Image (cartoon, rainbow, N blue to C red):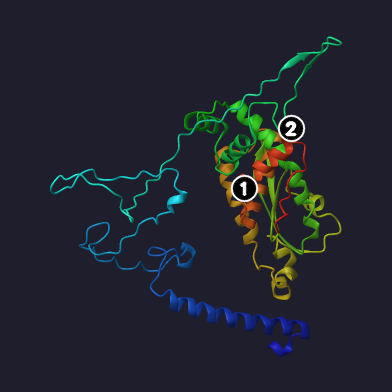
């Protein structure tokens, strides 16, 4: 049957058959390794088990008590070097526990016991006293300016970055964010102040976002997906563009392909992995011809998981400014994850640069 096909089709079929044989061998190896494992007794996903599979017979209940068993190996947190401790308390006995004689000296190798504790959490407040002085010559008055990088408001860079992460990364509402700052950090805050800091962080990180979006047309391959959301109680769509080293999110008023034109332009020549495969069946085997291209759009769908959970908790955004915050913060969070970077450090640096009127840090600078 294969020999009756056109040469190109025959080549593709033989390539697929070889790939299938390779995959079957790999599946057989994995099955041998995971024999006896089910989604109920291991970390295997439920989809690996047939829906009508017979349940495994229940294991006999062990007669052992819960917890560690006698004779098991003890596991303890390793001690850090003494010089790294914030406080060292030498403890010396004053008298012999047997005869009561007074004891002197030091143990060259004392037993070390370390206790970890949270420090007292309280805001660090800096007051800037701007003196206004009068000129003896002309009588004019001059007031000292704030140093470069000092915000006009009462929120510093780390506080703004932390507040943005509470809302974007940890998916807290404005009110819960304000409550957390007040209760645990002793930081006066309201929902309105949380929104103000949200807008300040968006303005600080937006240049980094736009510079990253400008890199999309240069990528050799992209995974693209979209999901429904809301903006001002109306319909909107959250698009995601996943490259190897970064991800860009954007909230659009439509799910039409205009988002592709806006971000990729007319000169994009890379490969796109998308969901509408049936209408373009010739794309199905692109992953066989181009190394590094995935056969599915899992990368795009995985990148949207955090955004989808956030949407379910927040019911979308209430303004265009909120949408800019969402797409900007999701881009920063996912890109830092891909690159193994500290998102809090990046946000703090971006806010500090913004306040000092310096160029924003680049999200691709370390790659």
- Asked if residue 213 lies left or right of residue 181, the reply is right
Callout in the foreground (2, 1)? 2
Q: Note whether 143 is above or below 236 in the view shown.
A: above
Residue positioned most to the bottom: 3
- Asked if residue 351 lies left or right of residue 211, the reply is left
The percent coordinates of residue 227 (x first, y second) are: 65, 49
Query: In this view of the protein, which residue sits in the foreground, 257 or 273?
Result: 273
The part of the image, by quadrant, that contains residue 14 is bottom right
**Residue 23: numbered disc:** none
The percent coordinates of residue 212 (x first, y second) are: 75, 51
Query: In this view of the protein, which residue sits in the foreground, 355 or 286?
Result: 355
Residue positioned most to the top: 139
**Residue 148: numbered disc:** 2
Q: Note whether 155 is above or below 260 in the view shown.
A: above
Identify the image quadrant of the C terminus.
Answer: bottom right
Secondary element type, mark 2? loop
Q: Residue sitting at 20 percent across and 62 percent down?
A: 63
Query: In this view of the protein, which residue sits in the foreground, 272 or 105?
Result: 105
Q: Note whether 291 is above or below 5 in the view shown.
A: above
Residue 324 in view in this figure: no
Secondary element type, mark 1? helix
Q: Categorize mark 2 by other alpha carbons within 10 Å: few (<14), some (14-19), many (20+).
A: few
Q: Residue sitting at 16 percent across and 45 percent down?
A: 101
Residue 133 in view in this figure: yes
The percent coordinates of residue 242 (x first, y second) are: 69, 57
N-terminal of the pair, mark 2 or mark 1, is: 2
Count the numbered circles shown: 2
Q: Which residue is mark 1?
A: 343
| Cα distance between the residues tagged 2 and 1 | 24 Å
Identify the image quadrant of the N terminus.
Answer: bottom right
- Asked if residue 149 lies left or right of residue 174, the reply is right
Q: Are marks 2 and 1 in contact (CB under 8 Å)?
A: no
């Amino acid at each position: 049957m294969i020999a009756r096909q056109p040469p190109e089709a025959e080549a593709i079929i033989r390539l697929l058959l070889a790939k299938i044989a390779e995959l079957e061998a790999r599946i057989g190896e994995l099955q041998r390794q995971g024999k006896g494992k089910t989604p109920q007794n291991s970390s295997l996903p439920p989809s690996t088990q047939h829906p009508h599979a017979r349940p495994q017979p229940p294991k006999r209940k062990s007669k052992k008590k819960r917890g560690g068993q006698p004779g098991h190996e003890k596991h303890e947190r390793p001690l850090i070097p003494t010089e790294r401790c914030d406080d060292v308390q030498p403890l010396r006995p004053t008298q012999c526990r047997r005869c009561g004689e007074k004891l002197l000296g030091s143990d060259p190798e004392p037993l070390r016991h370390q206790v970890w504790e949270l420090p007292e959490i309280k805001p660090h407040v800096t007051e800037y006293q701007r003196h206004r002085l009068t000129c003896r010559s002309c009588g004019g008055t001059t007031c000292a300016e704030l140093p470069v990088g000092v915000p006009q408001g009462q929120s510093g860079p780390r506080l703004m970055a932390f507040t943005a992460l509470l809302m974007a990364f940890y998916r807290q509402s404005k009110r819960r964010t304000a409550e957390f700052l007040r209760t645990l950090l002793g930081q006066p805050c309201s929902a309105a102040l949380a929104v103000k800091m949200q807008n300040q962080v968006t303005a600080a990180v937006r240049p980094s976002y736009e510079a990253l979006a400008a890199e999309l047309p240069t990528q050799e391959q992209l995974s693209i997906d979209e999901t429904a959301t809301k903006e001002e109680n109306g319909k909107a769509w959250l698009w995601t563009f996943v490259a190897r080293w970064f991800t860009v999110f954007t909230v659009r008023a439509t799910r039409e392909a205009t988002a592709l034109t806006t971000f990729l332009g007319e000169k994009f020549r890379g490969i796109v992995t998308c969901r509408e495969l049936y209408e373009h069946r010739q794309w199905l085997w692109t992953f066989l011809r181009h190394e590094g291209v995935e056969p599915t759009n899992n990368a795009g769908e995985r990148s949207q998981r955090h955004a989808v959970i956030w949407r379910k908790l927040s019911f979308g955004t209430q303004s265009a400014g909120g949408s800019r915050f969402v797409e900007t913060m999701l881009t920063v969070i996912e890109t830092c994850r891909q690159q193994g970077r500290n998102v809090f450090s990046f946000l703090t640096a971006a806010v500090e640069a913004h306040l000092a009127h310096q160029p924003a840090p680049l999200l691709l600078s370390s790659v």
